[in-house]
């Protein structure tokens, strides 16, 4: 999700879709609208229970670790510097998402070498304790995932971001830190290649080698059934053929089924139960995708922290699959409509 890409915020409807690249409404008249996210707060991250192996951690634990470790680095993730300039965590550097992805890369992560350069410039190497946050949890997850994929040993996302930091009684600053770039990553990279399926062709290869791979879309229901692309720069709507719906988003700009209203991560078991109805479960290999690779990283980390192991991020998502479909529809087929109904349309 990129704000300059003017993502259309569409209201959530409900269910699943395989994939199509037509900007037409679904004909699945029997589809039912999903209930809105619960307003009852539940929490994946429990106060006082964070530990080093966790991705999402509470603000108090993060501050304690940062204070104890001189080598720790803090990154505020976001598009542009407006939020950063209004105040940020002491010692935090801005990592603009354009430092790790561009339109020229089809909004996929940059090459491994370019990613390493971006993190080295922030003083981050393999053994750097890294803490990431952002006003948008998906931006934080995107940056954190890039570091995780490269193999940074200890990657954390501060649950609730700046708001949680201030709620815990800690101050913000407008001063930018002086940072010395790291000279060497300190190990081979990527360190976690199994977590990443980059392109549409990589997805096809992964599915061929692992036929039981579940392709899970975390997009909103209207996106999933092909009522909208969710983005004003993507004119076709639909999903990758064979995808199932992992309820996470109300619109293209959120993961409201995974977060509380304050931006903290919800206890995910209720969502996992919904996923299981679509065949998405932790006893299967699952790759998560969305429009351009932000929302799926949050879903990935939520599942990872809940104990899921055989999971990955599919980066190309609908944006790249749609581009490829227009060039070669038989190789990159799509689906419009609820695949559980009889009127789903396959475009190949």
Image (tube, rainbow, N blue to C red):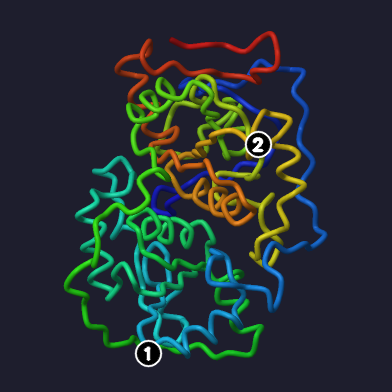
Residue assigned mark 1: 175
Residue 117's disc is none
Q: Is residue 291 left or right of residue 97?
A: right
- Residue at the (69%, 36%) spot, across then down: 275
Total labels: the figure holds 2
> Where is 218 relative to 330, above or below?
below
Towards the viewer: 206 or 87 = 206
Query: Which residue is outermost to the left?
Result: 183
Q: Which class describes the residues within 10 Å of circle 2: few (<14), some (14-19), or many (20+)?
A: some
Image quarter of residue 329: top left
Residue 339: horizontal and vertical position, in percent? Answer: 64, 18
Towards the viewer: 285 or 271 = 285
The C terminus lies in quadrant: top left
Towards the viewer: 127 or 7 = 127
Residue assigned mark 2: 281
> Where is 292 relative to 60, above or below?
above
Q: In this view, does 53 lie to the left or right of 245?
A: left
Query: Which residue is outermost to the right?
Result: 40
Label 2 element class: loop
Towards the viewer: 84 or 105 = 105
- Residue at the (63%, 32%) spot, across then down: 245
Residue 131: horizontal and vertical position, in percent? Answer: 45, 73
> Where is 203 relative to 54, above or below?
above
Mark 2 or 1: the one toward you: 2
């Amino acid at each position: 999700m990129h704000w300059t890409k003017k993502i259309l915020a569409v209201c959530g409807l409900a269910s699943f879709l395989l994939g199509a690249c037509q900007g037409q409404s679904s004909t699945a008249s029997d589809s039912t609208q999903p209930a809105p996210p619960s307003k009852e707060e539940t929490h994946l991250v429990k106060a006082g229970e964070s530990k080093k192996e966790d991705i999402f951690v509470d603000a108090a634990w993060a501050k304690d670790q940062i204070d104890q470790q001189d080598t720790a680095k803090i990154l505020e993730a976001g598009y542009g510097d407006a939020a950063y300039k209004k105040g940020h965590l002491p010692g935090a550097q801005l990592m603009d998402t354009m430092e790790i992805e561009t339109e020229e890369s089809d909004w996929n992560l940059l090459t491994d070498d370019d990613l390493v350069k971006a993190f080295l410039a922030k003083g981050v190497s393999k053994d750097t304790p890294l803490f990431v946050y952002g006003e948008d949890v998906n931006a934080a997850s995107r940056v954190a995932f890039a570091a995780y994929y490269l193999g940074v040993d200890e990657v954390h996302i501060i649950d609730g971001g700046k708001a949680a930091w201030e709620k815990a009684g800690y101050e913000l600053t407008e001063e930018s830190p002086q940072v010395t770039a790291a000279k060497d990553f300190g190990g081979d990279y990527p360190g976690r290649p199994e977590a990443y399926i980059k392109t549409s062709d990589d997805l096809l290869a992964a599915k061929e080698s692992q036929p039981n791979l579940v392709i899970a879309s975390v997009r909103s229901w209207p996106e999933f059934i092909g009522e909208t692309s969710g983005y004003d720069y993507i004119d076709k709507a639909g999903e990758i053929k064979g995808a199932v719906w992992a309820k996470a988003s109300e619109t293209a700009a959120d993961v409201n089924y995974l977060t509380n209203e304050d931006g903290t991560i919800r206890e995910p078991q209720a969502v996992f139960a919904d996923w299981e109805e679509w065949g998405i479960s932790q006893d299967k290999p699952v790759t998560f995708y969305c429009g351009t690779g932000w929302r799926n990283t949050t879903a990935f980390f939520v599942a990872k922290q809940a104990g899921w192991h055989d999971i990955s991020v599919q980066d190309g998502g609908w944006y790249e699959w749609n581009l490829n479909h227009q060039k070669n529809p038989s190789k990159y087929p799509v689906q419009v409509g609820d695949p559980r109904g009889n009127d789903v349309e396959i475009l190949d």
